Image: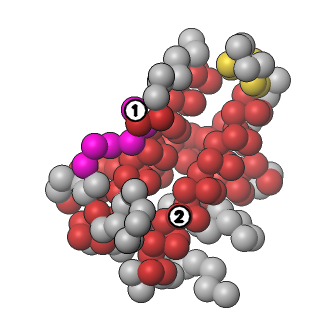
Amino acid sequence: MSVLTALFRGTGAHADSISCFEGLTLELAGRRLPRTQHSIWKELWHLNYWMDHELRSIAGPEVPTPEHASASWPDAPDPPDAATWEAGRARFESQINQFIALASNLTDGDRIVHPKAGESVRDVLIQMIAHNSYHIGQVVQMRRAFDVWPPAGGGDTW
């Protein structure tokens, strides 16, 4: 497994991205810490938004970036129901696996995806790893604060 493929799933200091969302109730998925803007649900929704955006851009043609960051966050802090929460988790796992497949078979890594920014497929993969890692770190912090870390799938505890 290459470094890129391993980092999409989580390795070393990077928490396992998929297991970070396991075992959470609807109440915990929608809970916010004091003085924070986002719940775990909102973080998941945001991650799904940008992974979908970049996967569609890689497939072509390039998807326009929204005018405001608020477009990449849901209005509601809570998932509306268990089915929506589970669908969000399943979508996240599917998209992570799509990125892993792209990284595993990076034959067109130098192909430009975002002409204005000059970003290649490889650049987008690295940016997605960094973006996901940042937000997964926020999810881990919330789970620790809610005393539900590590998940059953494992997670760094030191």
Quarter of the image where the C terminus is located: bottom right
Asked if one can make out residue 102 in the rendered structure from this viewpoint, the answer is yes
Circles 2, 1 touching at the beta carbon (< 8 Å) = no
Task: Report x, y in % for residue 79.
Answer: 24, 55
Q: Where residue 77 sits in the image (x, y, percent)?
A: 28, 55
**Whether residue 67 is situated above or below residue 151 in the rendered picture:** above
Q: Residues within 10 Å of mark 1 (few under 14, many from 20)?
A: few
The amino acid sitting under disc 1 is Ala
Between residues 59 and 25, which one lies in front from this camera angle?
Answer: 25
Name the residue that disc number 2 marks. Answer: 138
Let me know if residue 40 appears in the view.
no
Q: What stretch of residues is rendered in magenta?
A: 71-76
Q: Position of residue 31 (x, y in %)?
A: 30, 68
Does dot 1 land on a helix, a strand or a loop? Answer: helix
Type of the residue with mark 2: Gln
Q: Which residue is mark 1?
A: 71
Quadrant in the rendering for residue 86 = bottom left
Colour basis: secondary structure
Left-right relation of 60 to 123 = left
Q: State the predominant SS element of the stretch in magenta.
A: loop
